[in-house]
Each structure stands twice: as structure tokens, then as C-alpha cells.
Image: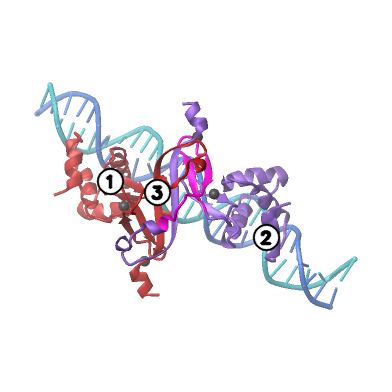
Chain colours: A red, B purple, C blue, D cyan
DNA sequence: TCCTACATTGGACTCAATCCAAGTCAATTT
DNA sequence: AAATTGACTTGGATTGAGTCCAATGTAGGA
């Protein structure tokens, strides 16, 4: 049963078939689907669901903090249900595979005061890039 | 005289008025202009320059490694002539101001082997987010 | 069961970027 | 200096991701 769905229900959401399938599609670890991928999988369960609703639902999940948006390239945004454990991303430059990673240390502490230009720094986002073992094998 | 322009000339580029003004617009530190901003400034010097040429020229500078593309948000890409000293970015979430920063330490060393999933990691990109002093003052 | 505020829908629209065929021109050759 | 030619430039059409909207449908409370 959907962990994400349970949390959303608990927030007093009006539950609809559309929202249910979107939440169900986002189950799992290392899930980073585009809106169109979410839509394609949702359609398998609920053929009449529209792209607009998928966008609406994902957008609401994001503003509720239950899903995060990930932009590792300039293509479509990806939607990540792993919102409750802060993490960064490791991306394969060949096939686009994305893994959640948890670096040791705090990258924010690595920014010296004299490199802050008077900014109040509140967040840091780290993207590691490389080649995944699968692509390395099929070199 | 343009440092960037000198490097491009040295690579055997056919020199045109259009390429010259694009290179000149990209002079300076902490420069992170969008293609449209580059175009607007280029038009002041060469009124008939087209958007397509600005895109072409920026794209070539990028593939020559003389300019880097920066995507700190989902809006237009930004073009950064500071390609020869690796750096990261500090971004104001309110006004979009971008500063070049050089964190101490090597963020790539912060990714433990058991968090690499067999990837060959070749690059890391860090974006610090916060509020700039200007925006903090006009809170 | 009825009501209505909220949710869904398809299509039009935006924005950044790319593509293209036709025209232009920088640099080499004669 | 003129001719040549392949690279460069141009405006407009096209694409891709996402947003907006007015009309329609419906979940959940009364
Ligand atoms: Mn993730
Ligand atoms: Mn920069
Ligand atoms: Zn791969
Ligand atoms: Zn600011």
C-alpha cells in the first residue's frame, strides 16, 4: 500500500482515481520519472487520465513537500518521491540513469565566508556526473 | 581587447562582425547572461544580428570549451565565459543573481565508494542557493 | 439524494531552443 | 583585383516542455 498515498490522504486531500494512480506510479526507490513517463504509466491503470491532471497532481505533491522536482539536465523535470531523506544525485551522462546518493560531509560548510558575497545560504544541490556500469560495459 | 576573442581567433575561426560582438558582450567576471540578453546587448553594437546567430555562436564557443552553459533554474540557459577556472555557483532565489564561488575541499571526494553504484564519476556540479544582500535589504 | 466547491479535461498558448532553405560574405586562389 | 567557394547568417517555421483556461464532472458533506 502506498506510503505516499497514506500521507496525502492524511492531509485531507479529496481522493480521486487520478490522484491515486499518480501516487501509485511514484512508488519505489531511485524513482525519477518525467511527467510524461508518469502519465504513460498512469494511463495503463486509468486510460482516460489527462496530462494536465498529471501536471496538476505532481505540482501539488511538490508544494506539499511530498515529492521533489529534480532537474539534472535541460530536458523534462523529474519527480522524486524520496522527499523525506535529503539526498543528491548521480547521473549517467550516456543513458540518463539517476541514483540517489548521500555524500559524507556537509557541502554547505565547504563554502568559506569570503566566498559568500554577503548571501544568506540556505541550501545546496550537488549533481555527480559519470558513466554507469551498464553503459561502461556496452562501451 | 577581448581575451576570449583572442583565443577564438587563435583557433582559426572565420572572424565575422557577429562573432566579434558576441565575444565582446561576454567580457567580464560573474557574467551569466541568457542567449536573449546576449542578443539584446549585441544588437546595440550590430543592429542586424539575428537570434539564430547568437545561438549558433554561443553553441560553438561552448563546444570549443571557451564558454560554459549554466542552468541554475528551469528558465533560459546562461552563458559563462569563465571557462578556464573551474567553479560553482551561488544563486539568489529572489532576484536570480549569480556569483562564481570556489568551495574549499573537493566535493567529489565526499562521495564514498559504496555510494557510487559502480559509476565512473567524472564531474560534480554544486549550486548554492540563498538570498543576496541586496534582496535581504529590500525584504 | 442534493449541492457545490474542488478536480479534471482538451486544446490553445507560452517560452526557450532548434531547424532549415535561401542569401551573404571572409578568406583563399588565380 | 576578381573570382571562387564553403562557411556563416538570416527570418521564419518547428519542436518540446510546460502552463492556462473555460467547460464539464464529481467527492464528500449536509
Ligand atoms: Mn532522488
Ligand atoms: Mn560562473
Ligand atoms: Zn548509463
Ligand atoms: Zn537577490
Q: Is residue A74 visible?
A: no
Q: Secondary structure at mark 3?
A: helix
Between the C-alphas of marks 1 and 2, the distance is 45 Å
Are dots 2 and 3 in contact, CB under 8 Å?
no
Query: Is B31 on the left or on the right of B128, as rendered?
Result: right
Q: Are marks 1 and 3 on the same chain?
A: yes
Which residue sits at x=28%, y=55%? A31
Tally the marks. 3
Query: Rounded to the nearest whole Å, what is the CA distance between mark 2 and mark 3?
Result: 34 Å
Mark toward the viewer: 1 or 3? 3
| Secondary element type, mark 1 | loop
Query: Is residue B88 covered in magenta?
Result: yes
User: Which one is in front in this view, the residue at disc 2 or the one at disc 3?
Assistant: 3
Q: Is residue A28 above or below residue A61?
A: below
Judge the density around disc 3: few (<14), some (14-19), many (≥20) Cα neighbours within 10 Å: many
Q: Secondary structure at mark 2?
A: helix
Mark number for residue B7?
Answer: 2
**Label 1: chain letter:** A
The circle on residue A107 is: 3
Output the chain of dot 3: A
Magenta part of the chain: B87-108
| Residue B27 x %, y % | 65, 48
Task: Using the rendered image, report if marks 2 and 3 lie on a common chain.
Answer: no
| Quadrant housing residue D22 | top left
Gap between marks 1 and 3 measured at Cα = 19 Å
- Given residues D6 and A96, the one toward you in this image is A96
Tell me residue A25's x, y (percent): 23, 52
Return the mark for residue A83: 1
- Is D24 rendered above or below residue A32? above
Q: Earlier in the sequence, mark 1 or mark 3?
A: 1
Q: Chain of mark 2?
A: B
Foreground: A27 or D11? A27
Amino acid at each position: 500500500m502506498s506510503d505516499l498515498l497514506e500521507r496525502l490522504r492524511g492531509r485531507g486531500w479529496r481522493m480521486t482515481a487520478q490522484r491515486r494512480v499518480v501516487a501509485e506510479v511514484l512508488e519505489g526507490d531511485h524513482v525519477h520519472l518525467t511527467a510524461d513517463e508518469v502519465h504513460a504509466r498512469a494511463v495503463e491503470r486509468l486510460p482516460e487520465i489527462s496530462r494536465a491532471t498529471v501536471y496538476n497532481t505532481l505540482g501539488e505533491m511538490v508544494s506539499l513537500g511530498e515529492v521533489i522536482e529534480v532537474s539534472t539536465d535541460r530536458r523534462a523535470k523529474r519527480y522524486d518521491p524520496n522527499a523525506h531523506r535529503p539526498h543528491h544525485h548521480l547521473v549517467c551522462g550516456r543513458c540518463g540513469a539517476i541514483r540517489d546518493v548521500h555524500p559524507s560531509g556537509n557541502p554547505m560548510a565547504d563554502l568559506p565566508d569570503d566566498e559568500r558575497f554577503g548571501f544568506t545560504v540556505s541550501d545546496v544541490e550537488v549533481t555527480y556526473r559519470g558513466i554507469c556500469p551498464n553503459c561502461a560495459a556496452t562501451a
